[in-house]
Image (cartoon, grey):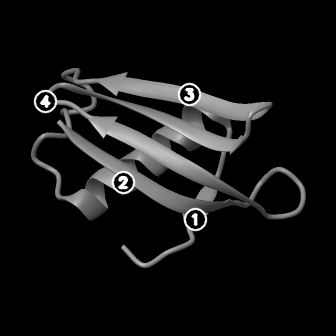
Amino acid sequence: MREYERQIAITNHGPVATATLKVVRLPTSWYAVIWESPERYASFSQDRTELNGGHEHLGDDDFLDRVRIVASFTQNIDFDYAEVR
């Protein structure tokens, strides 16, 4: 298991908002939460499938790019990482 915590800037819901992204990376799945405030957060996840090819072969940067893509498609949340990886 690997955990990531990154500061992000949400770019598609009005003015740019800062939030925290927390991700738990397991061998065949991962879970993430984008946390802007106690009242405003979104959670999402992905399991390995034949279609997505899994994530175990990805390095940290490529994996976090995958998390960003899934957030955009499943939650309609676009963001940039606010810190250097």
The residue at which mark 3 appears reads as 43
In the rendering, which numbered label is found on residue 27?
4
The amino acid type of the residue labelled 2 equals Leu
Estimate the x, y position of residue 62 in percent, counting from the top left: 28, 58
Along the line of sight, the residue nearer the viewer: 1 or 65 = 1
- Residue for point 20% across, 30% down: 26
Q: Secondary structure at mark 2?
A: helix
| Residue 74 found in image quarter | top right
Q: Marks 2 and 1, Cα distance to the nearest angstrom?
A: 11 Å
Q: Seen from this angle, which residue lies furthest right?
A: 14
Lower sequence index among marks 2 and 1: 2
Residue 32 picture location, percent across and down: 45, 35
Q: Which residue is mark 2?
A: 64
Circle 4: element type: loop
Give SS at disc 1. strand
Give left or right: position of 50 versus 44.
left
Place of residue 54 in the rendered image (x, y in percent of width and height, measured from the top left): 19, 33
Asked which quadrant contains residue 18, the reply is bottom right
Local SS, label 3: strand
Image quarter of the C terminus: bottom left
Earlier sequence position, callout 1 versus callout 4: 4
